[in-house]
Amino acid sequence: DRAVRVAVNLINPYGEIMATQWADHQAVAGKKTDVTLRFTGLKNPQLWSPDTPVLYRANVLLYDTNGQLIDQVDERFGFRSYVFDKDK
């Protein structure tokens, strides 16, 4: 087992960090684990569509307990919005 810190920077299409979250986690060698981070309060992200394919980046960083960077990965994604209304 190994204690790690998972940090995620959400980066807007202009390269600016718009939000950061992190969580401490106990990783187990050879086993996959999920870490859930909630980003609340994002202000008006531009929505992705085929006509306006706006992409953001999630910069995911993994640190050891000494703050040493172990690994990192960038993932591109787009925000989509759906509303479920029981009356429609």
Image (cartoon, rainbow, N blue to C red):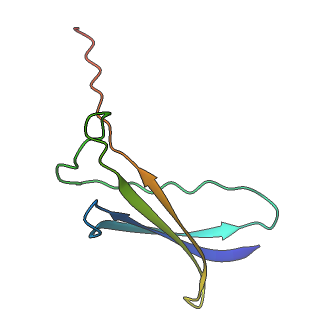
Q: Which residue lies furthest to the right in this view?
A: 30
Q: In this view, does 9 lie above or below 65?
A: above
> What residue sits 70% from the left and 68% below the top?
27
The part of the image, by quadrant, that contains residue 76 is: bottom left
Q: Which residue is drawn at 61% across and 54% down?
A: 34
Residue 5 is situated, as x and y percent measured from the top left of the image, at 55, 75
Q: Determine whether, in the image, residue 66 is placed left or right of residue 85.
A: right
Image vertical order of residue 33 relative to residue 84, above or below: below
Quadrant containing the N terminus is bottom right
Residue 7, x across and y down, in percent? 47, 71
From the top left corner, tell me how far across and down residue 56 is, in percent: 35, 55
* Residue positioned 29% across, 48% down in the render: 54
Q: Is 38 positioned to the left or the right of 85 in the image?
A: right
Q: Is residue 66 above or below residue 10?
A: below
Q: Position of residue 63 (x, y in %)?
A: 58, 80
Along the line of sight, which residue is nearer the eye, 82 or 4? 82
- Towards the viewer: 40 or 45: 45
Q: Quadrant of the C terminus?
A: top left
Q: Nearer the viewer, residue 44 or 21?
A: 44
Q: In this view, does 5 lie above or below 57?
A: below
